[in-house]
Amino acid sequence: MDRRQIKAVIFDLDGTLIDSEPIYFETDKKLFAEYGVNYDLAMKNKYIGIGSVKMVEELKAQYQIKDSVETVVEKHNQRYLEIAREKTQVFPEMKRLLELLKEQQYLIAVASGSSPEVIDIVLGSVDLRKFFSVVISAEEVKQGKPAPDIFLEVASQWGIKGEQCLVVEDSRYGVMAAKSAGMYCVAIPYPPQESLDDSYLTADLLFSKGMSEFSAQKTMEWLKG
């Protein structure tokens, strides 16, 4: 494939555009403690890139949580937003990449595992909503990542092919979803890892040391072929 055919760039949100994973961990740890679950970093890392609903479904089944999935997700979202409105930070190089892409008139989207309300409020709070012509939650498609549904839906809304899209992702599940959709992928692993999961190695451009290594300019140079 010739990457010069790329017309559109699809961004994951959490851990990719914004430094939200520590906020999610704080939220999850406190929330699930109320249900007797010791939510530790190993569990957090397991669910990076997985939608909130799927995470709650799995934990509800595993720990016999009596509240409904809908109730737990609603609690989760509201508590997250209480913190996120004040604490969410955009990764500076990602903001720069958005600006460069907009200057070059690429189509730009967000495709996230977070709930639609969370995505909308967070994008507004960090003043990023203006960059995106399409914003989609995993809750709006049949299957979340690592299934390709969310990325294929974005391409469908734009009326373009998978090979005309580039996905920017931090999680192995996001990389898997992008490649399953037949799209190019830039991967910035979060958290940075000594030994990368093999799925990251399928990315077309990999910043193996994570956000500390990521460069908007290098990404644009790669994009231009």
Image (cartoon, rainbow, N blue to C red):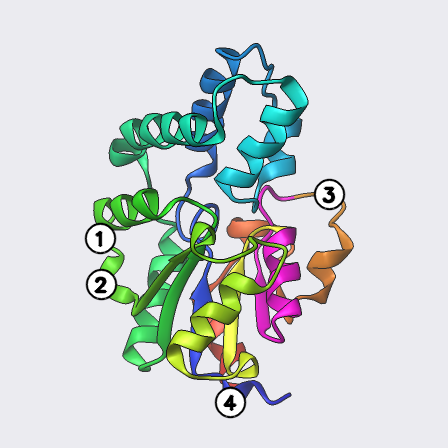
Q: Residue at x 49, y 39 (%)?
A: 52
Q: Residue at x 51, y 18 (%)?
A: 32
179 in the magenta segment: yes
Q: Quadrant of the C terminus?
A: bottom right
Location of mark 3 (residue):
194
The amino acid pointed to by label 3 is Glu
Q: Residue 130: which numbered mark, if any?
A: 2
| Sequence-wise first label, 4 or 2 | 4
Residue 202: percent from the left, percent from the top?
72, 66
Location of mark 4 (residue):
5
Neighbours of disc 4 within 10 Å: few (<14), some (14-19), many (20+): few
Kindly tell me whether residue 218 is visible in this rendering.
no
The amino acid pointed to by label 1 is Asp
Looking at the rendered structure, the secondary structure element under dot 2 is helix
Q: Residue 86: which numbered mark, if any?
A: none
Looking at the rendered structure, the secondary structure element under dot 3 is loop
| Sequence-wise first label, 3 or 1 | 1
Judge whether 154 appears above or below 11 on screen. Answer: below
The amino acid pointed to by label 2 is Lys
Judge whether 95 appears above or below 26 on screen. Answer: below
Residue 122: percent from the left, percent from the top?
29, 44
Residue 104: percent from the left, percent from the top?
33, 82
Q: Quadrant of residue 216?
A: bottom left
Location of mark 1 (residue):
127
Q: Quadrant of residue 148?
A: bottom right
The amino acid pointed to by label 4 is Gln
| Sequence-wise first label, 3 or 2 | 2
Boundaries of the magenta span: 172-192
